[in-house]
Amino acid sequence: MHSSAIFPLFYLPPVSYFSALKDHDFDFLIEREEHFPKQTYRNRARIYSPNGPLDLFIPVVKGSKFHTKIKDVKISYDFKWQRLHWLSLESCYRNSAYFEYYEDELTPFYEKKFDYLFDYNLELLQWLFKQLKRKEELRFTAEYVKDPDPGSDFRDKLHFKNPEYTVPAKPYYQVFEERIGFLPNMSIVDLLFNQGPQAKNYL
């Protein structure tokens, strides 16, 4: 029997996330019943800074790191991470071809406070699909499936420490590539800011 691929919900996911979705013809479920795992893209994004890869972290409320379902994990605002993330995006991409093209729509995500990490990531993902000209009706898991078909389980595959899923090798222009070279699998916003509406063709 055919089953949809299962994808975690990431913060500004890497390019490989969207490549994997495309490989599965965008037939996927978003995992919302898993326990929150530490050190993943669920609350971090990787962007291209003048010094190379830079990770942006969304802090979560203490206690959320152990045996809390992903949909129940709360965002912490003990420090002004939204301002830090926005300043980082600005400093890294202000000189990119399309930062200003997306700026006005993206800014509210760094001004409005969201209670839950899942809700925040979900609204961002919906915005990203809109920019990539994808009309996706998002569907979610109703229960946690421990051992789904390995070929369709992406909950642990798309990991910055041990990337199992390769991304397209073809480079695109990046702001600091003359200094460091092309860095693959940055956050999807790296592709958007540098390629604009052509990002969908890259994928």
Image: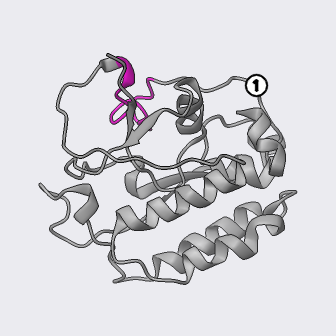
- Dot 1 amino acid type: Lys
Residue 156 falls inside the magenta stretch:
yes
Q: Quadrant of residue 128?
A: bottom right
Q: Which residue is at 40% across, 82% downward?
A: 79
The magenta region covers 151-164
Assign the C terminus to one quadrant of the image: top right
Look at the picture and state if 127 lies above or below 35.
below
Image coordinates of residue 108 in percent, x first then y, are 60, 79
Q: Secondary structure at mark 1?
A: loop
Image coordinates of residue 160 in percent, x first then y, are 44, 38
Q: Quadrant of residue 60?
A: bottom left
Report the front residue among 175 and 65.
65
Image coordinates of residue 53 in percent, x first then y, are 59, 48
Residue 89 falls inside the magenta stretch:
no
Q: Which residue is at 12% across, 54% downward?
A: 67
Look at the picture and state if 95 lies above or below 202.
below
Crowding at mark 1 (Cα within 10 Å: few <14, some 14-19, many 20+): few
In this view, the residue farthest toward the left is 67
